[in-house]
Image (cartoon, grey):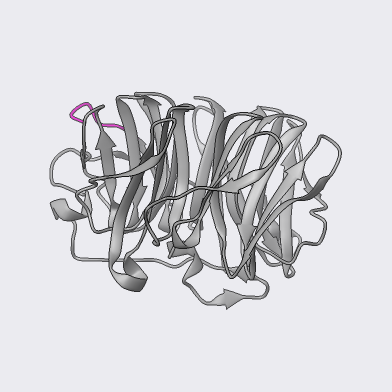
Amino acid sequence: MKLRLLAGLIPAVVAPFVLTSCHSGDPISGNPTGPTWTVVTSGSLDYLNAVWGSSASDVWSVGGVSNYGVIVRYDGTTWATSWSSSTLGTAWFLGGVWGSSASDVWAVGATAGVAGIVHYNGSTWTIVPSGNVPQTLYGVWGTSTSDVWAVGGSTTAIILHYDGTAWSTGFTGPSGQRFFGIWGTSATNVWAVGTAGAIYHYDGTTWTTMPSGTTDDISSVWGTSASDVWAVGGSAVVNGAGGIILHYNGTSWSPSTSGTVRDLYGVWGSSASDVWAVGSFGTILHFDGTSWSAGTSSGTTLFLGGLWGSSATDISIVGGGGTILHGPPPAA
């Protein structure tokens, strides 16, 4: 089960919580000893669940704590709070962020029992109607200003679509299921992943389920091309099955050895031979084009929820307690 779903419910939203552990320096956690990633001041103690940027000097992260959603931004020099629902006095949870440009950024989550969506136009964040769907959103991705997808679920898996004018329901999945992540290569090749090994594919017309080979939760999906896609997850907190990594070769999904028992929440890379995955207990894994191994130490035992980079040497990882890491270290 994805970490940020396991904490107690605050009014109509889900609040993440801190995981601490004595496993720092334990290779099985993906957190070996040695050089660590650089800790960056986020300007927030909120739990950060996802990160995305349009460039090295325009990076966004979303999350929240104490019933309030928060969005922080990096301008090339410092991180600072850009938006918080505390100013509205309303409870929010934010789980995903993506944009088509520096002036078109979406953040998704939940508020007041329904899907919550806010949009940035280059100067201001504005709440956008979600259609009052009674589900929490965890991920967002798109191909343009008029083709954006958001995924989630509370009682039923849901996929919403934005056509440049309004959000509407694009797909409803099985009852009791949730979608956590979404990514694609084009408007006719999109992947959504979620609970109990759920993997769905969109061909431009229809969402179709695909065999994943696992019944454990899948939290995130990302790839370099239509024939090189990675999905990560795990349900270690629930049934001890963590470190789930799957690969799609253009035909089918197959498991990869992760070398960890920790749940994984985010995956991103700069190329087919430089892919990173992050997860619980400060876990950082790296794929070099051949195999996965424990990446350079994160230096933390807090959960790491997401990552994004502008290049192989400029990667931001976000997580619990306002954690933001920058790297990788030269030794990675």
Residue appearing at x 74%, y 44% in the figure: 161
Is 105 located above or below residue 69 in the figure? above
Evaluate whether residue 239 shows in this view: yes
**Spot occupied by residue 76 in the image (x, y as percentages of width and height):** 51, 27
Name the one closer to the observer, 162 or 212: 212
Residue appearing at x 69%, y 67% in the figure: 91
Residue appearing at x 75%, y 29% in the figure: 145
Q: Judge left or right: residue 197 versus residue 117.
A: left
Residue appearing at x 77%, y 41% in the figure: 162
Q: Main secondary structure of the magenta part?
A: loop
**Spot occupied by residue 19 in the image (x, y as percentages of width and height):** 34, 66
Name the one closer to the observer, 279 or 290: 290
Name the one closer to the observer, 61 or 41: 61
Query: Does the magenta run of residues contain 314?
Result: no
Is 277 located above or below residue 234 in the figure? above
**Spot occupied by residue 296 in the image (x, y as percentages of width and height):** 21, 39
Q: Judge left or right: residue 108 versus residue 318.
A: right
Residue 269 figure quarter? top left
Q: How many tags in the picture?
A: 0
**Spot occupied by residue 191 in the image (x, y as percentages of width and height):** 55, 41
Check the image and name the residue furthest to the right. Answer: 165
Is 49 located above or below residue 297 in the figure? below
Query: Does the magenta run of residues contain 329?
Result: yes
Q: Which residues are magenta?
A: 327-332
Placement of the N terminus among the 4 image quadrants: bottom left
Evaluate whether residue 309 shows in this view: no
Placement of the C terminus among the 4 image quadrants: top left
